[in-house]
Amino acid sequence: MLKLHNSYTSSIEEVDLNKKEVKIYLCGPTVQSSPHLGHGRSAVVFDFLVRYLKYLDYKVTFVRNITDIDDKIIEKSKEEGITYIQLGERVTEEFGKAYKTLNCIAPDKEPKATEFIPEIIRYIEKLIKNDFAYLTDSGIYYDISKYDDYLNLSGRTKEDVLSGSRISLEEDKKAPEDFALWKFSKEDEPSWESPWGEGRPGWHIECSSMINSILGKNIDIHCGGNDLIFPHHENEIAQSKGAFPNELFVKYWLHNGMLNLSGQKMSKSEGNIKLLNEYLDQFGGEAVRFFFLRSQYRSPQEFSEELLKESESTLNKLIHFTENEEAAPKNNDLLKIFEDSMNEDLNTPKLIGEIFKIINESDDLDKKELEDVKSTIKYIFKILGFNFLKEKRQKNTDEDLINFFKKYEIKFSNIDDSINEYIAKRENLRKKKEYKAADEMRESILELGISIEDGTENGWSWKNS
RNA sequence: GGCGACGUGGCGGAGUGGCUACGCAGCGGUCUGCAAAACCGUUUACACGAGUUCGAUUCUCGUCGUCGCCUCCA
């Protein structure tokens, strides 16, 4: 029985979902700057969830949005001297590349805020009609005083929120906790026609509106980073309850923990971000994905390059162990371990531990049993989105390679042939017991990031650093 | 200040009222011309104080500390 932590009740609940239709919405990025590792974590851990639900035979409809209009995007694009569209497209592309490299299942729909302006306007009209919103000189605002259950998700009171220091009183809102649904545009700002005047949507309205337009009034699971609980998700709830007072809106709220750097949250405002695509280039998607598997999704997770290297080593051990076996569900004990761990609010670190315990105990198994263990482990990781392929990362230009091999009188055509020829030359030296020259060749090719290993099957591999 | 989470070996990270994961690193070994890889073996822990209990790392209370949110955030 799958159990998940529901932020709304602050407890782990047995999920009760219709197998034929599970609607999941994940708050995706605001495309103002390049993805950092924290974005990667959110995408990957909820990809584990989607894949696991599919494994359990749930029919999942998965939506992940892109917020492509917002104050920060406007600000940032002005700084760079490009349009908000250009900035948004560039960053969206970077996110897309990262999702793909991390092997995250593509969402069934990936809506952008700017593609849903008419729907957003209709949603605001509904809120006005239901008397949850009001018009001022600067825009349309949500009237929090009309919604009694505000802040149930974060477990705060309005007084708590008001004591916060960053609250802005300068706008012409009725109450400081009211938030913008529609902002009238200033000069040189992107804007859309609306019944109330030219402007753009507020930050929270696009999620409520897109969920409603694509998935309907109610969804099963709403996910996002735990830094979105307040105000973003509180405001989404307020909007949805204002527009559809008799609907539940979201059955289970799931929030992932933040990624820390030296104990501090990684975020744009802290300026301690590590760019996702840099690490994906360096370590490959599988190692980064495995890094996220090592921590339970709700816990804060410590990041460092060392830990990423560690993940790579551990992953390689698994790849090596299951090498030459096809992924297949053959060992029921392992499948039970898998399901039991995942059912416990996606306890992926426990799963890894249990799998290694089995590996360590696999000495006494006979050949068939061992093969079954290997295929089942490979199968489990396949479900979790791992392909267990040895990744080859080439970071050298052809010119580097041509020049390098020229020194050894090898014509460079492709990397595999050239290295094989190189290794053959070196083997010759070793046969003649000219070890000094052979060792030099092994040393020398390290500059290409290639290490030669005697006595292993492939004989060579790419190194990271 | 308010609300919440947490404190486990060198690092990361599970879990449990008694049998004390797991990974990485370290150390010792096998193999090797050497090195690497691989494989085998192995050291180190439950923030502090009190209580409950036959027994507490696990439950309760207190202390200290860390982190997150408090209208930018995944």
Image (cartoon, coloured by chain):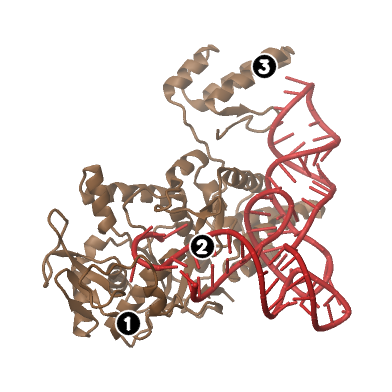
Chain colours: A brown, B red
Q: Which residue is mark 1?
A: A241
Disc 3 marks which amino acid? Ala
Compute the Cα span from label 3 to label 2.
50 Å
Q: Earlier in the sequence, mark 3 or mark 1?
A: 1
* Mark 2: secondary structure: loop
Q: Residues within 10 Å of mark 2 (few under 14, many from 20)?
A: many
In the rendered image, the vertical position of residue A435 relative to residue A28, given as above or below:
above
Q: Which residue is mark 2?
A: A257
| Front-most of residues A80 and B25 | A80
- Name the quadrant containing residue A301: bottom right
Location of residue A147 in the rendering, given as x and y in whole percent from the top left corner: 32, 84
Badge 3 vs badge 1, beta-carbon distance below 8 Å: no
Q: Which residue is mark 3?
A: A438
Is residue A244 visible in the rendered structure shown here? no
Is residue A6 visible in the rendered structure shown here? yes
* Mark 3: secondary structure: helix
Split into 4 quadrants, where in the image is the N terminus of chain A?
bottom right
Disc 1 marks which amino acid? Lys
Location of residue A270 in the rendering, given as x and y in whole percent from the top left corner: 43, 52
Which residue is depicted at the point 73% across and 12% down?
A432
- Name the quadrant containing residue B45: bottom right
Subunit that carries the residue with mark 1: A
Badge 1 vs badge 2, beta-carbon distance below 8 Å: no
Q: Earlier in the sequence, mark 3 or mark 2?
A: 2
Split into 4 quadrants, where in the image is the C terminus of chain A?
top right
Q: Is residue A119 left or right of residue A111?
A: left
| Front-most of residues B41 and A23 | B41
Which residue is depicted at the point 52% across and 48% down?
A288
Disc 2 marks which amino acid? Gly
Subunit that carries the residue with mark 2: A
